[in-house]
Image: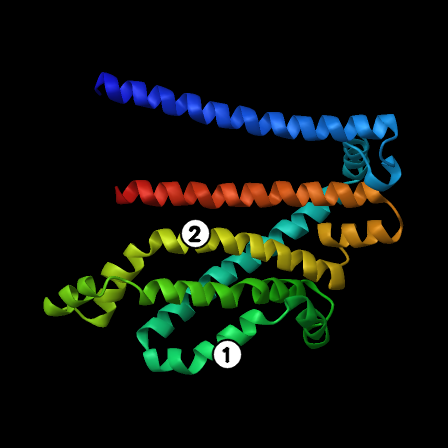
Amino acid sequence: MSPEQLLYQKKLKRHNLGIRAVRLSILFLILAGWQLAAYAGLINAFIFSSPIRILRCAADLGRDGSLQSHITITVLEVLSSFLLVAGISLLAAVALWWNRTLCEILEPYLVILNSLPKSAMAPIFIVWLGNNMKTIIVTAISVAVFGSILNLFTDFASTDPDKLKLIRTLGGTRLHCLTKVVLPVNLPSIISIMKVDIGLCLIGVVIGEFLSAKRGLGYLIIYGSQVFKMDWVMLSIILLCLIAGLLYLGISLVEKRFLSRRH
């Protein structure tokens, strides 16, 4: 490795460390300012809570295992809905790319379904499926799946036509075009769309838990607001942020592994 490359790597490491330090500093300042504002009486700690109150609340709920149960339920629902969205979206996008007539028939319906307010659909799912985890997962799927199908199909349809012509010229079939060109070329786009989907699934799960859950962080938010236990509400919101960050990090690690293999 040349001295210029070593110098560049050192600069890159210093830059990444600096970014992380600034991020942590901003988080620390937010938490410290929040806590000081509560101590000074600038905000009502009963309404807005505070970092220390939230930590105490987490410890109290953690002693009897209820907090772990709420977190586990929400994470399972998010992962289940995300895996289903990923599978359904990929298969549907491939089907639309494979059969353009099918695409012309279904595309307007997909656009309409994607534009529907999903929170309005949740009560219907409760009537159809009952007040259970299945309803929550279906609600989460409905939030993410239609937009995901449209985005994936758009990427598939915009694949370089010259590469597809080359495959056909060499005697390749439509299946070869799919497996050798369309999917490999669009792998970064697929992973990027999955990053968005994981967040949408989390939103859908929380919407479902608002309406039809007896456990989960969404239920904890609704119940806490009803009985004016705002520490529960703020704790649940913070945990949802942490879960969203960890899920996004997981998808990013998968992306780096796939892209490193390609190079």
Question: Is residue 248 visible in this depiction of the protein?
Answer: yes
Residue at image position (40%, 45%) is 255
Q: Is residue 66 left or right of residue 256?
A: right
- Identified at 29% across, 42% down, the residue is 261
The residue carrying pointer 2 sits among few (fewer than 14), some (14 to 19) or many (20 or more) residues within 10 Å by Cα, namely: some
Q: Residue 135 appears at what percent x and percent y?
A: 66, 67
Dot 2: what SS? helix
Circle 1: element type: helix
Which numbered disc flags the more N-terminal residue, 2 or 1?
A: 1
Q: Is residue 176 left or right of residue 230?
A: left
Say what amino acid the circle numbered 2 marks.
Answer: Ser
Q: Label 1 is placed on what type of residue?
A: Tyr
The residue that disc 2 covers is: 192
Q: Residue at x 45, y 55 (%)?
A: 193
146 vs 107: above or below: above
Residue, disc 1: 109
Tell me if residue 142 comes above or below residue 83 in the rendering: below
- Residue toward you, 51 or 70: 51
Spatial CA distance of label 2 from label 1 is 24 Å
Residue 80 position by quadrant? bottom right
Viewer-side residue, 234 vs 243: 234
